[in-house]
Amino acid sequence: MNVLIVQNKPFLGELWQRHLQRHAHTAEIATDQESAIAKLSETYFPIIILDVVLDEGSAFAVADYASYRHPDARVIFVTNTSFFSDGSIFQLCSNACAFVPSATQPEDLAAMVEHYAKTS
């Protein structure tokens, strides 16, 4: 499974990447909106792990572009804030399939990737 991780904290993105690779997934990391959109324009990623708060750019722009470019791609949003804790992210992004804390265990994130990859 091809997974795009959009995370501006390199240590966290690399942790998730290594764990997904151990589960036989191909995972690429983008650290901002521009690099994420560049990767999405070149490669199909059925699953995107996307931090809600990016230092450079907008997570919603990335999700919108993914929805346009790859309508069946699913987005797992992660955050370390209380933004959207009411679930409103599912109303804002039609491709959102999950919303979890950044502190979610990597093995749980890998299980979510596998689950949503089967349903996409």
Image: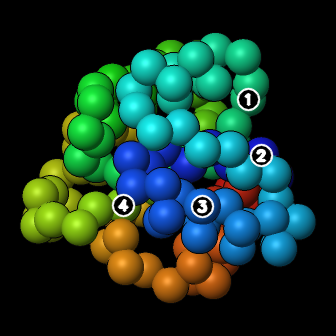
Picture colour scheme: rainbow
Frontmost of labels 3 and 4 is 3
Percent x, y for residue 24?
A: 88, 66
* Distance between the alpha carbons at the discs numbered 2 and 3: 15 Å
Other-residue count near label 3 (Cα within 10 Å), few / some / many at <14 / 14–19 / ≥20: some
Residue holding disc 3: 14
Q: Position of residue 100 (x, y in %)?
A: 36, 70
Residue at the spot x=37%, y=79% of the render?
103
Q: Which residue is mark 4?
A: 78
Identified at 63% across, 34% down, the residue is 72
Using the rendered view, name the quadrant where residue 94 is placed.
Answer: top left
Residue beneath label 1, please?
Answer: 44
Whether tag 1 and tag 4 are in contact, CB under 8 A, the answer is: no
State the separation of the CA atoms marked 3 and 4.
15 Å
**Mark before the other along the chain sequence, 2 or 3:** 2
Q: Residue at x 15, y 65 (%)?
A: 81
Kindly state the secondary structure of the residue where label 2 is placed.
strand
The image position of residue 11, as x and y in percent, is 49, 64
Q: Secondary structure at mark 4?
A: strand
Kind of residue sitting beneath label 2: Asn
Q: Answer yes or no: do the residues labelled 1 and 2 have beta carbons within 8 Å? A: yes
- Percent across and percent down for residue 112 are 60, 71
| Callout 2 touching callout 4 (CB < 8 Å) | no
Eye-nearest disc, 3 or 1: 3
| Residue type pointed to by label 3 | Glu
